[in-house]
Image (cartoon, rainbow, N blue to C red):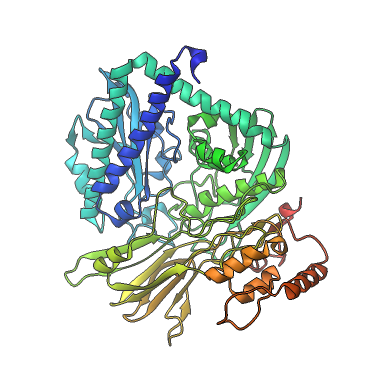
């Protein structure tokens, strides 16, 4: 690698490895020194390193963009110690999805020249707006969602802008957490710039920049050589949906991709995507030629690698950008909203697009893609303490990932890399509830030859009156199955289950009063299944039943596996009864199962009551 340009391959390897190490060190520093549960404990933040041409060099995870900072503050005006900040969705060139994502960018200097950038952004507790957490489910304007800050200079040559910090913390319900988190991110990025500058001092600007070029070029060539040939040339169409926007009644908010595979390029055309929603599920994707969206969607392509091990080795940096062309519809759609359309629940769109790309690729490669998996969902409680201060416990609980052609899906996966649920010991010591149980949601994974992963089943008992909030999708629709696999179970929240005030919550909730003593039960989505469930190995079904992942009833209904004895006896398979039942189920079905399975929720929302849309037909 790199020798074609006269670069010492050992130096190239050192530079690339050092960049990855610096990115991880920046993230670790943020995690150790931040204040808010969302950043410190849930780890909902990312770092990235860019060259002076604003190209992303590191590829372990996604991050925002440097373009909006350079647009408003030309590189020649930057000085050592400067730190830039922004969270304005519409002025972020597509790199920021909603206002709680606060972004810090710091230039790297070699001598008096800017040679790179270190950036961090994360989801913070609160930046104002009409509800705690700055994610009002019924917002009809971005002005309801919190404080918008275009790119500004937050530190000027090492001196913090106290006026700007005061304005931001004054607008937050959690000012101490916000101030602490921003300080952690600024300090960590400044540390990262010193590490990157050391590379330039050690090897010289010309060598390091040549290594940057090689890192990106090698990535482009890797995807061109290993991934693109796996997709047959041609045009393929598929779509998926958000189910509600918090304002209108639930309906199918369509996100469509027309994928055209050419020998050396992929074209993603989003024509046919629904008009922008009244509520906050819109996402600004069409800026900077879709630069952010290209790098956001590209990790899905890794599923086409020859082996799972090779898949894990493939990074996504700026090298993917030349291989993808984006075509967006006219302004006024879910992906091209017009200011000031609200965007705080944009996860319903941008995360759903990961599944849309996976689905359209599944059509192209005869199902050799994972089934659908969970997206980000926020649940939490908030209120006011006796001393008058506000509290907010907001958690990003994961769900099951989709079954794959070689393996079951993983349980309780979080889409944000390295993120996690909040530790019980921490939440019980800071917030007025007890975590009565936390485990896997039985039967939530979609049935298949390879089963979908399971979601969480978490139960909180409130010790004081509080308010429940939720920003979640897939409460009607489900994570689809593929290649004959079945859809997973949808998201469910039940308050006071089995009690006198039992009630089911919708996915979007701002302020449901929960009385002291009542339980909040949260069950997150299961991933879709892959392949015909009647082809699943009987031993695998037996194992799932023994482990409590699948009930005996579901094993018989979905997999055709019959067990002997009573429920309290050891789980043993009735071989003859299983063979007979599987034969009968195949005969009753009379055909191969559908390529995609949307679950029963699709028919509820389809205007014609159909079980699946036309794009599902191969």
Q: Going 63% across and 82% down the picture, which residue do you hit?
A: 565
Q: Going 35% across and 51% down the picture, which residue do you hit?
A: 43
Q: Can you name the residue that lies furthest to the bottom here?
A: 500
Q: Can you name the residue that lies furthest to the top here?
A: 6
Whether 291 is drawn above or below 490: the answer is above
Q: Position of residue 450 (x, y in %)?
A: 63, 57
Q: Nearer the viewer, residue 547 or 270?
A: 547
Q: Is residue 131 visible?
A: no
Q: Position of residue 340 (x, y in %)?
A: 43, 49
Q: Quadrant of residue 229?
A: top right
Q: Going 35% across and 57% down the picture, which residue do you hit?
A: 134
Image-based side of 614 in relation to 439, left or right: right
Q: Nearer the viewer, residue 497 or 271?
A: 497
Q: Quadrant of residue 21?
A: top left
Q: Position of residue 546 (x, y in %)?
A: 55, 71
Q: Nearer the viewer, residue 468 or 521?
A: 521
Q: Nearer the viewer, residue 195 or 330?
A: 195
Q: Is residue 139 visible?
A: yes
Whether 146 is drawn above or below 58: the answer is below
């Amino acid at each position: 690698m790199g020798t074609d340009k006269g670069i010492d391959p050992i130096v190239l390897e050192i530079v690339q490895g050092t960049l990855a190490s610096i990115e991880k060190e920046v993230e670790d520093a943020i995690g150790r020194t931040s204040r808010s549960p969302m950043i410190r404990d849930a780890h909902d933040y990312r770092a990235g390193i860019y060259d002076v041409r604003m190209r992303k060099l590191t590829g372990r995870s996604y991050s925002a963009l440097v373009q909006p900072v350079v647009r408003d503050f030309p590189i020649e005006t930057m000085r050592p110690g400067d730190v830039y900040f922004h969270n304005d969705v519409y002025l972020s060139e597509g790199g920021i999805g909603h206002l709680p994502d606060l972004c810090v960018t710091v230039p790297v200097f070699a001598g008096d020249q800017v040679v790179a950038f270190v950036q961090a952004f994360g989801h913070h507790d609160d930046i104002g707006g009409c509800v705690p957490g700055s994610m009002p489910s019924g917002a009809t304007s971005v002005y309801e969602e919190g404080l918008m800050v275009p790119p500004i200079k937050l530190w000027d040559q090492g001196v913090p802008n106290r006026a700007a910090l005061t304005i931001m913390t004054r607008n937050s319900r959690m000012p101490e957490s916000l101030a602490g988190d921003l300080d952690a991110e600024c300090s960590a990025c400044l540390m990262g710039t010193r590490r990157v500058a050391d590379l330039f001092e050690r090897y010289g600007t010309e060598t390091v920049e040549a290594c940057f070029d090689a890192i990106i070029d090698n990535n482009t060539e890797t995807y061109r050589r290993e991934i693109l040939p796996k997709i047959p040339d041609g045009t393929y169409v598929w779509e998926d949906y958000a189910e509600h926007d918090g304002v209108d009644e639930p309906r199918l908010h369509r996100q469509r991709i027309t994928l055209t595979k050419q020998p050396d390029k992929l074209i993603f055309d989003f024509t046919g995507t629904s008009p922008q929603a009244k509520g906050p599920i819109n996402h600004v994707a069409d800026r900077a030629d879709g630069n952010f969206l290209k790098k956001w969607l590209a990790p899905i392509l890794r599923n086409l690698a020859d082996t799972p091990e090779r898949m894990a080795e493939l990074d996504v940096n700026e090298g993917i950008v030349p291989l993808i062309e984006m075509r967006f519809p006219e302004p006024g759609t879910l992906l091209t909203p017009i200011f000031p359309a609200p965007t705080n629940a944009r996860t319903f769109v941008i995360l759903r697009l990961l599944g849309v790309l996976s689905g359209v690729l599944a059509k192209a490669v005869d199902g050799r893609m994972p089934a659908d998996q969970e997206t980000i969902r926020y649940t939490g409680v908030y209120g006011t303490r006796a001393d008058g201060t506000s509290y907010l416990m907001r958690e990003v609980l994961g769900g099951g990932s989709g079954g794959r052609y070689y393996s079951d899906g993983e349980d309780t996966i979080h889409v944000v890399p390295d993120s996690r649920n909040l530790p019980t010991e921490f939440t019980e010591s800071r917030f007025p509830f007890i975590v009565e149980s936390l485990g896997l949601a039985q039967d939530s994974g979609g049935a298949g030859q390879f089963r979908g992963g399971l979601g969480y089943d978490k139960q909180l008992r409130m010790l004081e009156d509080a308010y429940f909030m939720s920003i979640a999708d897939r409460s009607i629709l489900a994570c689809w199955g593929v290649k004959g696999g079945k859809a997973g179970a949808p998201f469910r929240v039940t308050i006071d289950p089995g009690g006198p005030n039992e009630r089911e919550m919708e996915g979007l909730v701002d302020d449901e009063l929960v009385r002291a003593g009542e339980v909040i039960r949260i069950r997150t989505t299961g991933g879709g299944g892959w392949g015909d469930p009647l082809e699943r190995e009987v031993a695998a079904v037996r194992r799932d039943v023994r482990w409590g992942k699948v009930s005996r009833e579901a094993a018989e209904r979905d997999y055709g596996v019959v067990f002997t004895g009573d429920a309290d006896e050891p789980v043993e398979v009735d071989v003859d009864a299983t063979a007979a039942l599987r034969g009968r189920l195949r005969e009753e079905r009379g055909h191969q199962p559908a390529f995609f399975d949307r679950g029963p929720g699709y028919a509820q929302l389809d205007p014609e009551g159909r079980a699946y849309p036309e794009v599902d037909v191969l």
